[in-house]
Image: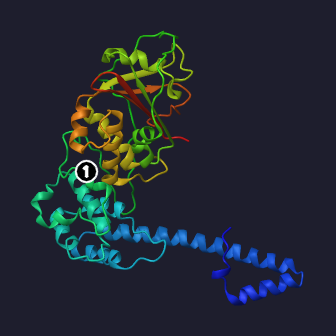
Amino acid sequence: MDDTDDDSSPVLRHTVRRHAAQGDSRQVADLAVELTDRIDTATKETHEHRHQLAHLVRVLAITPGHDSLSQLLRLFDRQQGHGVDLAPRFVASLLAEHREAADLVGPLSERDAQGRLDELRICLFHELILRGVDVDAFPGMSDWTRVVHGGHPLAWLPRRRGALETRIVLPSRSVDSGARSAGVTLPTEGRVDPPTPRTRERSALVDSATLDLHQMIIAAPEAGGWGHSEAWVFRTDEEVEPDRVPALLPTLPMGCVEGLGATGRFEIARRPADAIWNLLFATASLGSAYHHGAHGSFGRLWAWKSMAALSDAPPDASAEEVERHARRTTWFHFESDAEWFCNDAFTDYGIAALSPDRRRIAVLAATDTD
């Protein structure tokens, strides 16, 4: 516990010390219990107030018309109190879903010397790009990516929707309904399941993923609040042909295939790069059964970052370079009956990426369970 003497009421301190000096420790403890109860009550009230605030902000964002937008921006223009979060990522997602870009550009482009709209603007900028808006057609949006206080992680993203961003799953919400992912299913097209029984011989390859690389690969499921995710990277001495990967994966020293055996279910399909990008984007942006996700702007960022790490793009690569690298990578989507996965419908998936030089296999496994 922190030392709070400097912040305590002088009257309270005097009373407590008097009781302690008189040997009345029970009174001191009773005061502590009373304050604990007050803190618990205040915490519950604060949680309820935040829930109510979120609903009010949601109503203003979704309600059509200039006035509702003006009143919403008035909330952002205020100096927010301690602990108050108007959730600009979420608000930007709602505004992009329910309003036309032409109706947003004027009010959002007004002078904001304090930078209180910075986070909302840059998130909204990328939400609109995801929805196919040509932001260059609105000169007022040119300053939305500039923030008053330093740089911003979203500045790395391209100003146009990339060729891989074509199968985007976007939310559909109302005042009372939220967004939930439709879940993940392995497609029937492109199936390359290895024949069973598979070999029981284990691969001698060793996981070489560093902590930083591991964290970057799992960035999308982490951002989406999925229950658990892991990553592995294996480097080979010789080139691996894509048609060898389906049989090789179940033999690798990975928790997501441990105990699978020679006949356990292991289903796999080759996927185009844009399908993998969309899977990562939906994971990050829409979230899990118990998490609202990172929403569109940051979902876009973390989908790209996971894809960069999986495809072995250089650490300092631009989004355009990552896209070129991803297109030369061979992608696989798999499911497994290994105990690592929950194996409930729509809650598990694995991604494997064979790098362009065919000497590196990276794997991401995610499950929406703890």
**Left or right of 271: which side holds 362?**
right
| Colouring used for the render | rainbow
Q: Which residue is mark 1?
A: 157
- Label 1 crowd bin: few (<14), some (14–19), many (20+), radius 10 Å: some
Instruction: Name the quadrant containing residue 91.
Output: bottom left
Report the number of numbered marks.
1
Which residue appears at 26% of the width and 77% of the height? 113
Q: Nearer the viewer, residue 157 or 179?
A: 157
Which residue appears at 29% of the width and 74% of the height? 73
Q: Nearer the viewer, residue 106 or 82?
A: 82
Which residue appears at 48% of the width and 69% of the height? 50
* Image quarter hosting the C terminus: top right
Q: Nearer the viewer, residue 157 or 91?
A: 157
Outermost residue, right side: 23
* Image quarter hosting the N terminus: bottom right
| Coordinates of residue 109 in the picture (x, y in percent) | 19, 71
Q: Is residue 92 visible?
A: yes
The amino acid sitting under disc 1 is Leu
| Coordinates of residue 303 in the picture (x, y in percent) | 33, 43
| Coordinates of residue 363 in the picture (x, y in percent) | 41, 30
Position of residue 12 relative to residue 243, above or below, is below
Q: Regarding mark 1 in the picture, which secondary structure is present there?
A: loop
Instruction: Name the quadrant containing residue 124.
Output: bottom left
Q: Is residue 224 visible?
A: no
**Left or right of 139: which side holds 92?**
right
| Coordinates of residue 227 in the picture (x, y in percent) | 51, 43
